[in-house]
Amino acid sequence: MAAFRFLRTALLALLLGASAVLAQATPSDAEEKLIDTLIQRVSKMSAMVFLRNGNEYNAADAAKHMQAKYDYFKKELVTAEDFIDRCASRSEMTGQAYKVKLTNGAVRDANEFLNSELRMLRQQAKKSSS
């Protein structure tokens, strides 16, 4: 019985410790660079329209919004994918998914679009480090 109590206490301490670490998580330098590069890339997509909560925004405004959300939620993020999920693809207030209107008029989910952009950035980083 004492061994069970010790095991239960140890497991609880481990879970609480892991929660504390995750609560204070921040992106690594490499992930932060990817996030910054992704935001900068968005800011330069001047021919695109970003749709948020039924309103249209230009690339510069979309990038500013992403940056503000990133600054607010940074301590809760670990990866660039976390950034996209939490800051760049849906409204915290309404839960609505953000959209991107491409230059050809097609509309895509921002999550899908930004993850595609992120994959390209990761591939470029991999090539340049080889």
Image (spheres, rainbow, N blue to C red):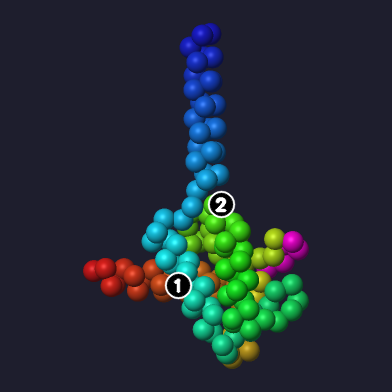
In the image, residue 18 sits, relative to residue 88, either above or below, namely above
Secondary structure category for the residue under label 2: helix
What type is the residue that disc 1 sits on?
Thr
In the image, residue 19 sits, relative to residue 60, either above or below, namely above
Residue labelled with disc 1: 37
Quarter of the image holding residue 60?
A: bottom right
Return the x and y of residue 129 as percentages of the image width and height: 26, 68
Q: Which residues are magenta?
A: 93-97
- Lower position in the chain sequence, tag 2 or tag 1: 1
Label 2, label 1: how far apart the Cα atoms are: 19 Å
Residue labelled with disc 2: 76
Tell how many labels.
2
What type is the residue that disc 2 sits on?
Glu
In the image, residue 122 sits, relative to residue 19, either above or below, namely below
Residue 89 magenta-highlighted: no
Residue at 50% x, 41% y is 21
Q: Is residue 8 visible?
A: yes
Return the x and y of residue 91 as percentages of the image width and height: 69, 65
